[in-house]
Structures are given as structure tokens and as C-alpha cells.
Image (spheres, rainbow, N blue to C red):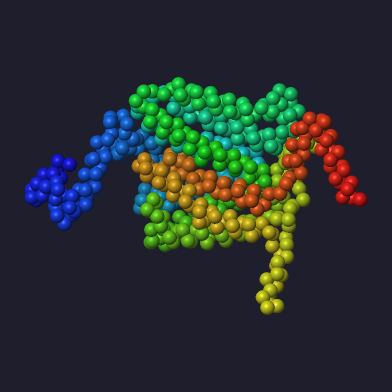
Amino acid sequence: MAEIRRRKQEAGGDEDAACMGPSISPSITEAEKRNSSAADSSDHIDSEEERLPEEKFVDDLSKSIPQGTDKTPEILDSALKDLPDRWKNWVIRGIFTWIMICGFALIIYGGPLALMVTTLLVQVKCFQEIISIGYQVYRIHGLPWFRSLSWYFLLTSNYFFYGENLVDYFGVVINRVEYLKFLVTYHRFLSFALYCIGFVWFVLSLVKKYYMKQFSLFAWTHVSLLIVVTQSYLIIQNIFEGLIWFIVPVSMIICNDVMAYMFGFFFGKTPLIKLSPKKTWEGFIGGGFATVLFGLLFSYILCHYQYFVCPIVYSEELGSMSMTCQPSYLFTPQDYSLKVLGIGKTISVFPFIWHSIALSLFSSIIGPFGGFFASGFKRAFKIKDFGDMIPGHGGIMDRFDCQFLMATFVNVYISSFIRTPSPSKLLTQIYNLKPEQQLQIYSALKENLFDLLT
């Protein structure tokens, strides 16, 4: 402000002239006006404690967080030392991409339980990578309990969401175990009680002069839970609808990510979005076309196998999860006529193929915005990656930022266009009723069926 006044005085202006516009005091530039207003606004901050983390703080914070793509195994580093950095990164990313794809195939071979456990482990790791950034904020000010509270809320959230899945799909079995029946009956009340304990714990941990930071980090924890835990809960639900509803969307995101990188690496010239300077329109469009073609082919292959298309239900006869069924309409070939003016032919196609087009379009058009969102988050804290677990890729969150958005879409898509009332689920709910209530339902069904038959 003093500098601006000095320049105004040197130019022969006064405060009244300054109010008349830029034509009266040409020495005041637009940049100086912005600096002046910023200085004025800063006068309203009472103390340093009320400021949000600024540039110097963010610079210090970024130094304590791993920068993933800079860390590579020594063997690879020495073997590729003669390559330019661009090609070296390309080779490393390629090697670990194939390692992850092979690992994903092995997990699928392990069955639905292996997929569910993997989903839980990925969720925990993603949460840890996000929370570690907030923990650096908290640790600088020496505030208590942030990390402990964050993990407590993660456990509480998982108890609620995964408990809901267990009650839905295995309620009958759990109810037969006497000491577990209480947990099923009062599951939501117990979940709320656990949350209240964490809520009270947080309030008691508040420290004078740091309220704003503590409440900001409290919100940080809950947003992280919303992004990570809720999405993993939806992924588990998708798996129970049939492995194909999990494998195909996940594979589409992987395909889109790989092919967008390949097209961008070799042909990319036109920047796509400022949040990710390396993303190009060529990569975005090329990855989209490749994803649609891959989705059609991959879906066609999986539709032939009961292992992938059957819903996962608990079989009382087998005493375990069952993945055998009579394939539904979606996975039974149907004839479609392609005749135009009497010219053409009839083709036989699995109806699921048409749904795979919708999934592939979402994964290639909207899915990348999950990655752009993560890029913006990382830019805010001046970090390259969320972690350094996967050489050439960064952390687990860097690989699954688009997967969570895709999982939500698949779950919404199934509930809107696919799911129909399930007899097995209805029977599960009926078995949970008291004997007199079950008899009441039996009598009502008997009368209704008798009326229909006569």
C-alpha cells in the first residue's frame, strides 16, 4: 500500500484523483490494484493462527510426503540408466502395469472372497495415503489424536457398511448363531453408538486457538471416508451381483488409462486440461475408442462363463457361497434383426453387450475426471503422487482414483436398469422374521396363489 501511494504522489495524483479511474492515474497498473486489494484483505486477519496453510507451509509439507515416480528399484535403475528420462519412465510404467494386471488376474482366480479382501486392503491403503497428508498438517502444530481418531472413524465406518452387507447376504446364517443374533438385530444402533464415542472423543481433543484447523481436519477425515469407504462398500455390492459387474468396469478403467497414456505418449500434441498438463486430446480420444472396443470383446468372452455372470448367493445346502445358476436374460444370446429395407441379417448377441457400451462410454468420458480431481488435489499440496508404493505410478490412490467413481456408476446403473426383486433376498428377510410373522406371510401367499390358480 505504501509503495502504491508513493507512486501516486510521484505521478502528481491524490486520493480523489485515484477514485476517478485508471485514465486519471496511469501509473497504477491492474496488478498493483490486485496487490492493493490483497493487502487490504489481509488486514482483516487477526493473528497468524487463523491463517490457512499458505505457500511456505505447503512447500515444507510437500517435502515430507513421498514423491512416487522418482523412486525405482536399483536393478531397473541401473539397467535403464542409458535411456532418456522419458523412455525410462515409459519402460518402468509398462513393466509395473503388466505386474499389476497379472496380479489382478490371480486375485480373480482366487474367487469373490479374495476380491473382497483385496478391496478392503486397497481401501485401507488409499485412506492411509490421504490421511497422511492431513497428519502432516496436524503434526506441525502438535495437536493430539488426529491420526488415532481418523483410524477409529475408519473402523467404525467399515463396521457399519460391511455389517450391512453381511446382514443382507448372510443374515439367516448369522441369526442362527446365538451370540451373533444380537449384533444383527441392533447393528445400526451399535454403529451409531461407536460413532458417538468418536464424536465425543474429537470434541474433548479440541485445543484453544486451533479450532479452525481441527474442524477442517475433522471434515478432511469424513470426506476421505465418503470417498474411500462408501465406494468400497458399493464395490462389494457389485461383486455380489456377479463378478462380471466388477471385472468388466475395473478392466475398462485400466484399459482406458493404459491406452490414453500410449496414444498421448506417441501422438499427443494438444493439451486437454490444465490440472494435468501431460494429458492430451489425442490420448483422451484414442483411449476412449480403445476402451469401447475392448469392452465389447471382453464382455463377449466373459458372458460365456457362469463363474462370471451368476450372482453370488449363500447356499444353505453347500454351507458356502454359490456361483452356479441358470444365466439370466442378460447373459443368454438373443436374436437382433439388422435388416434395413429388407436387406441385412439377424445376429445373435448377449444383451449385456449393449450395457457394456454404456459402461465403456462412462469409463472413457467421465472416468478420467476422477484422475483430474486427484491431480488437482495433489497440485494443491505440491506433491507428485499420493505415495511411492508402485514405481512409475505412485501410490495406490494414484491407480484407483478413477475406480471409485466407476464403482458408484456401476452400482447406480444396476439399481436403475438391471436389478429386479430377488427371491433369495426376500427369503432371507422372511427367515429373519418371527415364526408367527412367517406364518402370516405364508397364509397371505397361499390365498393369493389359490385365487390366481382358480
The quadrant where residue 264 appears: bottom left
- Residue at image location 28% in from the left, 31% down from the top: 46
Q: Is residue 84 above or below residue 50?
A: below
- Residue at image location 69% in from the left, 59% down from the top: 350
- Residue at image location 48% in from the left, 42% down from the top: 397
The quadrant where residue 299 appears: bottom right
Residue 214, image x, y percentages = 41, 29
Q: Is residue 148 above or below residue 119?
A: above
State the count of labels.
0
* Left or right of 144 in this view: 413: right
Q: Residue furthest top?
A: 204
For this rendering, which residue is in front, 258 or 6?
6
Residue 110, image x, y percentages = 64, 41
For this rendering, which residue is in front, 181 or 330?
181
The quadrant where residue 229 appears: top right
Residue 449, image x, y percentages = 86, 46
Q: Is residue 100 visible?
A: no
For this rendering, which residue is in front, 273 or 394?
273
- Residue at image location 75% in from the left, 37% down from the top: 428
Q: Quadrant of the N terminus?
A: top left
Residue 129, image x, y percentages = 45, 36
Q: Is residue 345 above or below residue 258?
A: below
Q: Is residue 367 visible?
A: yes
